[in-house]
């Protein structure tokens, strides 16, 4: 398979079979490639080594789900600040034979002994974030490996044990620390002060490694070797599980995870939430993902004339900002784990409710934007969720047309800073609300509960055209800014007709509450001035950079893009 690296757009079920094969409904001839027909395979990921690992699997006849395993295994090594086998994921999968979109929910869960007040101090006040993020209580039962195993078990074509070779070799031989990882290593993250991180990223003389240095990880190579041989049990049972329990129970603020919590973890296969947008059908994960809120954003924007404008028009950015504020107000008030709380998706996406919300977009920015009251709820609730950033997104399509759109995370940068067998543990439970009670004493929708999955901003989406065929995929890193990052990218690519790479390069604007964060210096001064005239003052800085990776199929051609703020790459093979 011949490869091209693009710098501009192109004209677990736990028991794994020895060699999993596709199964499912009979092919839909109208929407699936014929037995002879194949499509261009591609991998879009945040690091070239990860993309190459995935493409190597595709070259050997692997499926998209096979390649996803290889990509994640490598990302855990070369981009440990963002995702890893100690974290969680949402996988949105398109099955070309059936035309079906399905969700694999690998979000972390709270341990069985987790309490609603676990992030409160002895005085009943929320812990400071820098304290909570490195605590043992921050780590949820990891789900990425289990979700990948379920997806690969159902859709894989190669043996599970053949998918880790690239990552194992790279961990053994070492890799050159990239500029982005090197930059993070020089920053003041509390995770870098943990004994594990200090030992991992230190040179023999005690100095911290930097960009250009070689980093080896024999412990991770050993773990991946066992993961290849034993399947997910290598993580969820045995010595690695015991180490995870030990590390999470250590001070400060030790957690309550047990071996039973790890052994009991199960990913959940869910139906997507899908909604219309222009000529597309956009499918996203249901709660605890915020996917339905993203569909609300698209629907609100479609009720404006943003598509008739363009990136040089201040009114276009104003409309995007006000629609974002409305969406975030509803998202913050109502979203949590749908297995534990009622999330009023039907009401939020009801056309009449959307009309009502869109009508609130006036000629000047609203002084305050409050959540609405859609059908199915009595009133909005206050939310104290922080949602730090530390995430990655990648997309894979195989030669048969199957697609994986996967957002994966260890939560904050370098997770909790605690390591086991060469990988960082997540601090995902800090995605729960630190204030578990509402004013009336009832539990907040995103309060901690045993077995509960914290709310997520991850929205790996897949788009279908009017014939039900794959039309595109998008996702991003960036904490609660993910919704804005993905929204801007789709508006620029579809509404404004920009090539995908140019769309992703457009400056970011994140409007949530009364703060309008933006890449101010990247905007034309006329845009900044025009927004100010409409009552919006842009504030520089928005935390973690975006990490949008996206693709649209335009007239049969692959228009793929990687976020220029990171180190991504688009690799496209041959049929």
Image: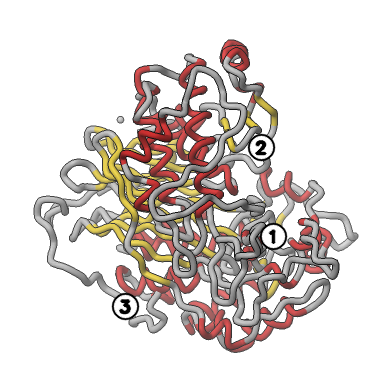
Residue 542, disc = 2
For mark 3, does the 10 Å Cα neighbourhood hold few (<14), some (14 to 19), or many (20 or more) residues? Answer: some
Q: Tell me how far mark 2 sits from mark 3, CA to CA.
A: 45 Å
- Identify the residue shown where x is 50% and y is 62%: 89
Q: CA distance from mark 1 to mark 2?
A: 23 Å
In the image, which disc is placed on residue 435? 1
Seen at 56% across and 27% down, the residue is 507
Q: Earlier in the sequence, mark 1 or mark 2?
A: 1
Q: Which residue is mark 3?
A: 19
Compared across the picture, whether 95 is left or right of 13 comes to left
Is tag 2's residue or tag 3's residue first in the polypeptide sequence?
3
**At 51% across and 66% down in the image, what residue appears?**
107
Within 10 Å of disc 1 (Cα), the crowding (few <14, some 14-19, many 20+) is many
Mark toward the viewer: 1 or 2:
1
Whether residue 491 is situated above or below residue 342 in the rendered picture: above
Q: Position of residue 448 (x, y in %)?
A: 62, 68
Asked if residue 558 shows in the view, the reply is yes
Q: Is residue 359 left or right of residue 29?
A: right
Location of residue 316 in the rendering, given as x and y in whole percent from the top left corner: 46, 20
């Amino acid at each position: 398979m011949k490869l091209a690296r693009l710098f501009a757009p192109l004209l677990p079920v736990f028991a794994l079979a020895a060699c999993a094969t596709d199964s499912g409904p009979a092919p839909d001839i109208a929407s699936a490639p014929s037995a002879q027909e194949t499509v261009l395979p591609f991998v879009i990921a945040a690091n070239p080594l990860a993309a190459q690992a995935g493409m190597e699997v595709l070259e050997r006849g692997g499926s998209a789900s096979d390649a996803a395993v290889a990509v994640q295994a490598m990302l855990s090594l070369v981009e440990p600040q963002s995702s890893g086998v100690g974290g969680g994921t949402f996988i949105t999968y398109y099955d070309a034979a059936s035309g079906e979109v399905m969700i694999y929910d690998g979000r972390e869960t709270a341990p069985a002994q987790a309490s609603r007040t676990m992030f409160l101090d002895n005085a009943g006040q929320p812990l400071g974030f820098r304290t909570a993020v490195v605590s043992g209580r921050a780590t949820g039962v990891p789900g990425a490996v289990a979700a990948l195993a379920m997806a690969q078990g159902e859709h894989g074509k190669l043996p599970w044990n053949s998918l880790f070779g690239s990552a194992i070799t790279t961990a053994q031989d070492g890799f050159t620390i990239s500029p982005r990882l090197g930059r993070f290593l020089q920053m003041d993250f509390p995770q870098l002060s943990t004994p594990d991180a200090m030992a991992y990223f230190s040179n023999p003389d005690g100095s911290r490694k930097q960009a250009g240095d070689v980093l080896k990880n024999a412990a991770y190579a050993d773990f991946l070797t066992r993961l290849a041989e034993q399947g997910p049990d290598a993580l969820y049972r045995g010595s690695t599980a015991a180490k995870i329990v030990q590390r999470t129970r250590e001070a400060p603020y030790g957690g309550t995870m047990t071996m039973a919590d790890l052994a009991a973890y199960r990913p959940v296969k869910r139906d997507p939430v899908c909604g219309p947008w222009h000529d597309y059908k956009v499918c996203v994960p249901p709660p605890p993902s915020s996917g339905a809120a993203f569909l609300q954003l698209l629907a609100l924007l479609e009720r404006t004339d943003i598509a008739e404008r363009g990136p040089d028009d201040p009114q276009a950015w104003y409309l995007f900002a006000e629609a974002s504020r409305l969406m975030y107000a509803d998202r913050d008030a109502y979203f949590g784990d749908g297995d534990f709380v009622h999330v009023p998706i039907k009401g939020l996406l009801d056309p009449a409710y959307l009309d009502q919300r869109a009508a609130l977009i006036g000629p000047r920015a609203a002084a305050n934007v409050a959540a609405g009251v859609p059908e199915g709820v009595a009133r909005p609730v206050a939310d104290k969720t922080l949602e730090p950033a530390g995430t990655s997104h990648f997309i894979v399509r195989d030669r048969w047309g199957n697609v994986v759109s996967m957002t994966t995370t260890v939560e904050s940068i370098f997770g909790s800073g605690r390591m086991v067998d060469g990988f960082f543990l997540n601090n995902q439970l800090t995605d729960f609300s630190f204030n578990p009670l509402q004013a009336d004493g009832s539990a907040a929708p995103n309060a901690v509960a045993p077995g509960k999955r914290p709310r997520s901003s991850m929205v790996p989406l897949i788009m279908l055209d009017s014939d039900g065929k794959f039309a595109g995929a998008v996702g991003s890193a960036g904490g609660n800014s993910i919704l804005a990052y993905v929204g801007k990218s789709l508006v620029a690519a579809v509404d404004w007709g920009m090539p995908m790479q140019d769309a992703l390069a457009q400056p970011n604007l994140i409007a949530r509450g009364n703060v309008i964060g933006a890449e101010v210096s990247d905007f034309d001064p006329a845009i900044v001035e025009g927004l100010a005239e409409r009552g919006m003052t842009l504030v520089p800085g928005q935390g973690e950079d975006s990490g949008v990776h996206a693709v649209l199929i335009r007239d049969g051609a692959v228009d793929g893009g990687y976020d220029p703020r990171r180190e991504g790459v688009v690799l496209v093979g041959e049929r």
